[in-house]
Image (cartoon, rainbow, N blue to C red):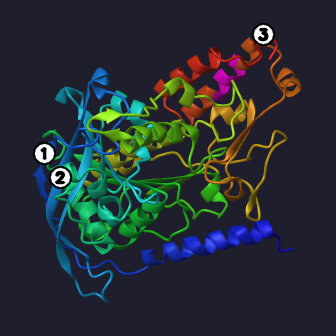
Amino acid sequence: MTTRRSLSFLGFALLVVAATMQAVGADPSARPVPIPKVEGPVTGGSRTGGPFWASPFDLEQFGYVEEEYFLSGTASDRGLAHSGHEHTAPYKVRILVRRPADPARFNGTAVLEWFNVSLQQEVEHEWPIDFPMLMRDGYVSASVSAQFLGVQSASPMSLKNWDPQRYGTLQHPGDDYSYDIFAQAAQALRSGLAAGHLPVNLVLGTGTSQSCLRLVTYISKLAAADGVFDGYHPTTCPATAEIPDTLVPMVWGTSEWEAGIPSRPDGPLLRVWEIAGTSHANWWEIRFQGAQGYRDGFAFDGTTYFPYGWDEDDAGQYGERRPFSNNVAPARYAFRAAIADLNRWARDWRDHRAGRLAADQVRPAPAASRLERDGFSLRRDEHGNALGGVRLPALEVPVATYRGEFNDGASGSTSALNRETLTALYPSHNDYVAKMRTATDAAVANGFMLSADADEWMRRVAASPVRRYGR
């Protein structure tokens, strides 16, 4: 029987297929990717006096520096939009970079994100989700203005409109040139010119949702010829495209929202992680972006008139304290593990290709089971949580029902379990903490959570009110 729910998923599937049709085709001829001109660090401006979408807290306390550079040069459309006939155009865009202040802390890897422009402005995913791990482990994290909408659309939040004084000289020739701009940004990082002259030896490319689809097209059509990325981390777009899976390592992360459409199989250099309990946009990410958005949207002459500060304690709640309408499953831990696993895999694969490491010494990212399905719907346990997929401790030792399917909306939902259920599951607070410790140790052992994140998570669990004072 065809239901309204099934039709909604079918419609979504058709939209995704249409969006990823570009991902089928032969690679164009190989061409060297140029290193763009790099200017900066950029200073000044009439709004905040700093970059648009800068971090909502000072990175100096973590030994990090946040800098913005302008990249310029000549970009090519690679012949993708004009029946194989190449066109070129001048461009000038920005790249926002976070790096260790002390070069000795740098681990050699730069993560480059394709700014998402779904909201008619530039928004990040990787830095808001992963910043504690990225700074803890010494990465360079950067995001580039690959697309037209973020730079000079009619939106008041596009860069040229938001702060003409700072960004008035930027010029984007259009999205046909976005793939080449993204690749040139990778070269700017690898050269060290946009990374504080740090010796970058690995560059990982990432993009989320709308920009994930663009990244998938790049991987399918241009990555093999360019050779400028050592690994890829597409996130929160359906893992359905038949992209090359033998080029460089790739970890593709999806939430329940995208995984309603069955993902493609893993490949020799591809792992797909369907993360149970998670939504397309999670509370931690929304909270971080809210702090950025309020500051930038209400800032004039260096003053923010409606500040909304970043509160990590509030953002990290997982339904243990109060009711939430948003999905608060801690997806961040899986995404951080994905970056760390990909970094190790990419480094080993590069060394293997260079003859420095035997094939059986390459350490791939772990494979994950798929979410269990009934058609386009996910199968759920007695608490309403999804079965299968990447299992974070909050799903194995639940205090709430976490939903993130397409019909639940992009931000999903959280429903706390009632007191009777919690009492039956966890006779005492100590019992709850012990069960969570077992589940957390398993997530770390399986490669889906990092040990440092496990320590932070268990401190949060131990301080929770679950089965304390009668709850």
Residue 92, position as x, y percentages in the image: 18, 61
Quadrant (top left, top right, bottom left, bottom right) of the N terminus: bottom right
Mark 3 and mark 2 lie on one chain; the one further toward the N terminus is 2
Residue 459, position as x, y percentages in the image: 57, 17
Q: Is residue 183 left or right of residue 132?
A: left
* Residue 83 location, quadrant: bottom left
From this viewpoint, is residue 353 visible? yes
For the residue labelled by badge 1, is the local secondary structure a helix, a strand or a loop?
loop
Q: Which residue is mark 1?
A: 40
**Neighbour tally class for label 3: few under 14, some 14-19, many 20 plus, Cα within 10 Å:** few
**Neighbour tally class for label 2: few under 14, some 14-19, many 20 plus, Cα within 10 Å:** many
For the residue labelled by badge 2, is the local secondary structure a helix, a strand or a loop?
strand
Asked if the magenta segment contains residue 82, the reply would be no
Q: Which mark is residue 296?
A: none
Q: Is residue 433 above or below residue 291?
A: above
Q: Is residue 20 above or below residue 327?
A: below
* Residue bounds of the magenta highlight: 433-439
Quadrant (top left, top right, bottom left, bottom right) of the C terminus: top right
Residue type at numbered disc 1:
Gly
- Disc 3 vs disc 2: Cβ atoms closer than 8 Å? no
Q: Which residue is mark 2?
A: 70
Q: Which residue is mark 3?
A: 469
From this viewpoint, is residue 189 visible? no
Q: Is residue 60 left or right of residue 9?
A: left
Mark 3 and mark 1 lie on one chain; the one further toward the N terminus is 1
Residue type at numbered disc 3:
Tyr
**Residue at the spot 63% in from the left edge and 15% down from the top edge:** 462
